[in-house]
Image: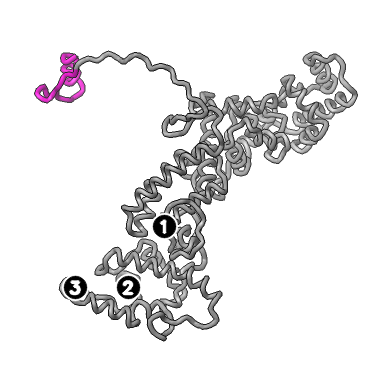
């Protein structure tokens, strides 16, 4: 073995240091492990995910949420500033939570528990996920506002949850729409499961063309045998899907290879939908069960009606068809003939790979683009636009009403940039007072008929008075005077100097 390495090193440009080389002893592989059967009562973990047959819908969330609370409790003793807690949530706690909830359908009540746990973590409260019945120093509106609007930059759990499932669905469609037909292994179980549930109407590719408002599709998504996550994923796909490229109504070859049932992109989608309403659904199900699932299988010939009836009789176990079934078949044949005659082929028909594996056009962030070439970053949550009016009031700070329209002022408030001679912990407490008191005063003003006065004197209650002019605050500053003088520090004398760094 050492001789082989010595011959390889000169060829690769490396040099072997024999003095530092250690030859390990050979160890045989251990015998194969005994097969372990996972019962429903004792789930196990695979790649960090809870796995068990017939697992209850809430079991995986309860397991993950309990671990999430434990992690928040652990980090609550290490994070002491508001900014540090936000960073811990975004970088440590929430990524692990969303990884384990990647295959769990979003539920509003469960998402609210996650939001309450984050708020309790920020406010140093017992982390239980139970709704609070008291006022907090920081309003939820400020917590879940973007940093560009002087918020903390957190996002509500329901929004993040649904967005991640939408991104997962777009990745599945992007991976299964490859022209070479090689479906990645990580998508094969889900594709096979959906194809099985959609049988006999078609396959997973045909389901991507379906209309989510039809009764058959709604029943399919509500099937208890189907994992619950597929319902929001498919609904998000139906919402952002625009068309298949080339457009179905501009190329005859595309129409001939498309599904005829539940297809929302066919030119005659409304007429075909009428053939699947009420009692006619049994006829459509019987024809689909015989293998007539695509337009090209309906044999568009001059004698289409009689030929289709004869073909159905040959394949059907029943040698006689009722008059209603024959009339229904003639209507279907007429629609298929209209699809073949009404759509003329383009000058350059698409290749066969584009016909069998269509390239999808989707709408992301207000733009229509090709899914195959769309960047992965666009699958995630779109950036929230900056509001026209700042959520932070500035009258009590003796500043202009449009103070936060300036980019430098917004950056200062968002990044918590405070005077350099003020301790970071103190600047964090100032940020808590300024932001938290906004929502608190707004709520308390409903119950107060007279202007609020200071708790320590009779002066009107303002932030400038509270932080600078109040006798109690002046005594506090005077007690720190010997320490600041020894350190060569100078306390701020204006409210702008307390809140902003180098404010002019």
Which mark is first along the chain, 3 or 2?
3
Secondary structure beneath disc 1?
A: loop
In front: label 2 or label 3: 3
Mark 3 to mark 1: distance in Å?
33 Å
Residue at position x 29%, y 63% in the image:
424
In percent of width and height, residue 169 lies at: 54, 37
Region in magenta: 1-24
Mark 2 to mark 3: distance in Å?
18 Å
Residue 234 belongs to magenta span: no
**172 or 472: which is nearer to us?**
472
Residue beneath disc 3? 483
Q: Is residue 245 above or below residue 440?
A: above
**133 or 460: which is nearer to us?**
133
Residue at position x 79%, y 35% in the image:
277
Residue beneath disc 1? 125
Residue pushed farthest front?
Answer: 41
Mark 1 to mark 2: distance in Å?
28 Å
10 Å crowding of disc 3: few (<14), some (14-19), many (20+): few
In percent of width and height, residue 325 lies at: 85, 25
10 Å crowding of disc 2: few (<14), some (14-19), many (20+): many
Residue 498's label in the rendered image is 2
């Amino acid at each position: 073995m050492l001789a082989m390495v010595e011959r390889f090193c000169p060829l690769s440009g490396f040099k072997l240091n024999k003095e530092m080389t250690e030859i390990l002893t050979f160890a045989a592989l251990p015998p194969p492990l005994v097969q372990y059967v996972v019962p429903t009562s004792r789930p196990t973990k695979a790649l960090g995910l809870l796995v068990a047959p017939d697992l209850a819908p809430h079991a995986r969330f309860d397991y993950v949420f309990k671990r999430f609370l434990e992690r928040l409790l652990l980090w609550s003793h290490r994070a002491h500033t508001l900014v540090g807690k936000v960073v811990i949530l975004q970088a440590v706690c929430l990524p692990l939570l969303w990884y384990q909830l990647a295959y769990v359908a979003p539920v509003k009540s469960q998402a609210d528990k996650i939001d309450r746990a984050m708020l309790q973590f920020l406010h140093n409260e017992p982390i239980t996920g139970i709704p609070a019945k008291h006022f907090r120093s920081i309003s939820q509106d400020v917590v879940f506002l973007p940093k560009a609007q002087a918020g903390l930059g957190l996002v509500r759990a329901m929004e993040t949850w649904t967005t991640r499932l939408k991104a997962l669905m777009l990745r599945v469609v992007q991976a299964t729409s490859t022209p070479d037909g090689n479906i990645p292994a990580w998508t094969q179980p889900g594709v096979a499961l959906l194809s099985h549930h959609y049988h006999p109407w078609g396959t997973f590719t045909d389901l991507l063309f379906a209309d989510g408002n039809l009764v058959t599709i709604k029943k399919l998504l509500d099937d208890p045998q189907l994992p619950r996550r597929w319902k929001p994923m498919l609904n998000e796909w139906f919402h952002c899907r625009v068309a298949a490229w080339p457009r179905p109504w501009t190329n005859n070859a595309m129409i001939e290879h498309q599904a005829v049932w539940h297809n929302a992109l066919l030119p005659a989608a409304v007429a075909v939908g009428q053939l699947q309403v009420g009692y006619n659904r049994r006829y459509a199900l019987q024809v689909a069960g015989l293998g007539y699932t695509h337009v090209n299988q309906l044999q568009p010939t001059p004698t289409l009606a009689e030929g289709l009836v004869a073909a159905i009789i040959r394949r059907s176990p029943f040698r006689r068809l009722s008059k209603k079934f024959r009339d229904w078949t003639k209507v279907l044949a007429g629609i298929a003939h209209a699809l073949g005659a009404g759509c003329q082929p383009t000058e350059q028909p698409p290749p066969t790979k584009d016909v069998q594996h269509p390239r999808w056009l989707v709408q992301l962030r207000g733009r229509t683009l090709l899914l195959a070439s769309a960047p992965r970053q666009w699958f995630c949550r779109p950036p929230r636009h900056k509001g026209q009016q700042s959520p932070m009031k500035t009258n009590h700070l003796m500043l202009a009403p449009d103070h936060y329209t300036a980019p430098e002022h917004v950056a200062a408030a968002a990044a918590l940039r405070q005077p350099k001679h003020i301790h970071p912990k103190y600047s964090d407490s100032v940020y808590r007072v300024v932001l938290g008191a906004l929502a608190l005063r707004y709520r308390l003003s409903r119950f107060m008929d007279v202007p609020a006065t200071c708790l320590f004197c009779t002066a009107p209650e303002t932030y400038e008075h509270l932080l600078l002019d109040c006798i109690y605050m002046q005594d506090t500053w005077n007690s720190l005077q010997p320490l600041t003088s020894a350190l060569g520090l100078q306390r701020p004398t204006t409210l702008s100097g307390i809140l902003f760094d180098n404010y002019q």
